[in-house]
Image (cartoon, grey):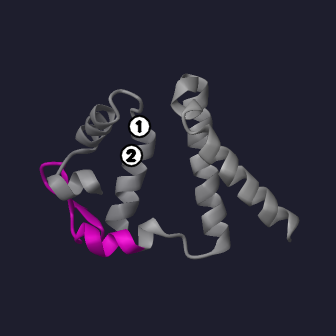
């Protein structure tokens, strides 16, 4: 959505821009981008123009509220799982990326352990 807030783009342009923005770390597949665009179009968030470019129909600010915060515990846990999977991928690719955050990770792990023990 951020990319579409900048200018209308084709799915291929979105894929290329994501790869560029992540400095080559991630290039989403067409199988993930196009279904998402189709779903966003069905929900009235974007419109596919005659030139094949998708344009955002709502301001990103109005959409952001529902995207940033999960609305229930299940949503929060799903979001946390996604971040953990991302961190695991980073660790497999380059151990130095996480090593400088070891103390913060330990602090978070301890907080989760405390929470779990109190249930």
The reply to whether dot 2 and dot 1 touch (C-beta < 8 Å) is yes
Mark 2 neighbour density, 10 Å: few (under 14) some (14–19) many (20 or more): some
The residue under label 2 is: 33
Q: Which percent across, then down, holds residue 38?
A: 36, 57
* Range covered by the magenta-colored residues: 44-65
Q: Element type at marker 2? A: helix
Which residue is at 58% across, 25% downward?
95
Name the quarter where the C terminus is drawn. Answer: bottom right
Q: Position of residue 73 (x, y in %)?
A: 66, 72
- Number of dots carrying numbers: 2
Task: Report the front residue among 13 and 59.
Answer: 59
Please determine whether, in this image, residue 73 is positioned above or below residue 93.
Answer: below
The verdict on residue 82 being magenta is no
* 2 or 1: mark nearer the eye: 1
> Which of the labelled discs sits on residue 28, or is there none?
1
Q: Left or right: 109 with respect to 9?
A: right
Q: Is residue 109 left or right of residue 82?
A: right
Q: Is residue 62 magenta?
A: yes
The residue positioned 41% from the left and 54% from the top of the image is 36
Upstream in sequence: badge 2 or badge 1: 1
**Above or below 1: residue 70:** below
Spatial CA distance of label 2 from label 1 is 7 Å
Q: Is residue 66 left or right of residue 93?
A: left
What is the x, y in percent for residue 23?
32, 29
């Amino acid at each position: 959505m951020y990319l579409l807030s900048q200018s209308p783009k084709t799915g291929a342009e979105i894929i290329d821009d994501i790869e560029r923005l992540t400095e080559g770390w991630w290039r989403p597949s067409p199988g993930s981008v196009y279904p998402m665009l189709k779903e966003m179009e069905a929900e009235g968030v974007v419109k596919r123009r005659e030139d094949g470019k998708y344009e955002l129909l709502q301001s990103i600010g109005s959409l952001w509220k529902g995207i940033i915060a999960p609305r229930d515990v299940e949503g929060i846990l799903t979001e946390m799982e996604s971040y953990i999977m991302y961190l695991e991928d980073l660790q497999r690719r380059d151990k130095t990326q996480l090593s400088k955050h070891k103390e913060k990770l330990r602090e978070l792990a301890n907080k989760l352990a405390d929470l779990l023990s109190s249930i």
